[in-house]
Amino acid sequence: MEQLDRAAKKMDLSQNLHEILQHPEKLHIVSLPIVMDDGSTKVFLGYRSQYSSILGPYKGGIRFSRDVDADEVKALSFWMAIKVAATNLPLGGGKGGVVVDPREVSESELERISRQYVRALYDNLGPNKDVPAPDVATNPKIMGWMVGEYSHIAGMPVPAAFTGKDVDDGGIAARATSTARGGFYLLEKMRIKQNKEANSMRIAIQGFGNAGRVFADLAYAAGYNIVGISDSRGSIYCESGFDIADVSSYKKNTGSLLGYSGATEEWPESRAVLEVDCDVLIPAAIENQIDSSNVDRIKSLLIVELANGPITPDADRVLEGRSVVVVPDVLANAGGVIVSYYEWYQNYHGEQWDEDATNEKLHVQITQAYDDIAKMSQEQDCSMREATFIQALRRINDGYEKISQIQHRKVI
């Protein structure tokens, strides 16, 4: 909400829309009674926040976590509304989840939870209403269960009801790498604009899960020097750079980055990598990683936020005061939702694009969004984050005015 307020003030957003955007349009809280494997019944709590449908159907992930609550899904659905508007997608923002640790239930219990979630929210989901996708601790298999349940209730196949599915269920191969690939395309855009060579730029990456690892693979293949990497157990550093394939193999075999022989330094703390000497910093883990306790030790002058909300508002202001360029999460990790939209579009229209064509469309769309936002940043003399919000809010405002005009004509 602080980000909304700052951008609204900068662009003189109408008071009516400003008030509307401080609340989700709908917040669903549902009880999910599940028969467990031992025959007992346990009730799980499910959420779905549908923030804004001004520009189109709600779009956003479903996460399975013990930490899911109403405030979290509201905040994430708001961010999604900004993200889709900033990248010029005809969608709104949504986010959902179930309070469950997938590690504490069997696969059959997890399937029953997934299907019951769809049954509880069926009337509020669908290709023209709300199109969920995977998020924390959910995956293509779970999306397959969900779209299968939705189609069963509908009485016909409805592949466009969910995205992030396996290819056999109507998904697209490009989705698995799209979040990291979108961020990588933006880094390449900035590097070329600055007339720099890839091998002259040192990158540190916090997080070696899907987004961080794929980003490392792409950057390493392009010639960038990956000097720092971390996972949940700790951080490793090598001034001369890592062989990413070798690091990935070690991580797969041991379950950790610590102890890797190619590292010259290591620390048993994931956040340590944020402070290494580098040209580009990629937070690709979880939220609130750069805050008042470590912001003064951040050395990079360019940060690309692959994670959601990795920098706190206070730290963000400090970095802005030091002229650190931050490519915000709502732009930097938008590759995921862009390709999710492509999956929805193909399912909805009965089309099928190959992986290369999908990646090329992603490249065009996300770099065009960057150009628009960079121009806005210069015109408004503001940070990339504020410019992204302003760009998104202008598009939402245009949609709001069109809806208001239609409603006014109906009244007349």
Image (cartoon, rainbow, N blue to C red):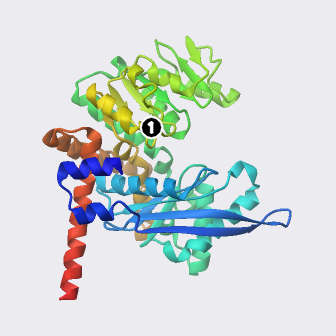
In the rendered image, is residue 283 in sight?
A: yes
Quadrant for the C terminus, please.
bottom left
Q: x, y percentage for residue 262?
A: 58, 14
- The residue lying at 67 percent from left, 68 percent from top is 32
In the rendered image, is residue 172 in sight?
A: no
Q: Secondary structure at mark 1?
A: loop
Above or below, comparing residue 368 to residue 188 in the picture: below
Q: Is residue 13 left or right of residue 150?
A: left
- The residue lying at 46 percent from left, 25 percent from top is 274
Of residue 121 and residue 192, the one placed in the foreground of this image is 121
Of residue 315 and residue 126, the one placed in the foreground of this image is 315
- The residue lying at 22 percent from left, 30 percent from top is 193
Extreme residue in the left direction: 379
Q: Quadrant of residue 233?
A: top right
Q: x, y percentage for residue 164?
A: 52, 56
Mark 1 residue crowding within 10 angstroms, few (<14) / some (14–19) / many (20+): many
Of residue 47 and residue 362, the one placed in the foreground of this image is 47
- Residue type, label 1: Pro
Q: x, y percentage for residue 22?
A: 35, 60
Q: How many marks?
A: 1
Look at mark 1 in the image and give the residue it sits on. 310
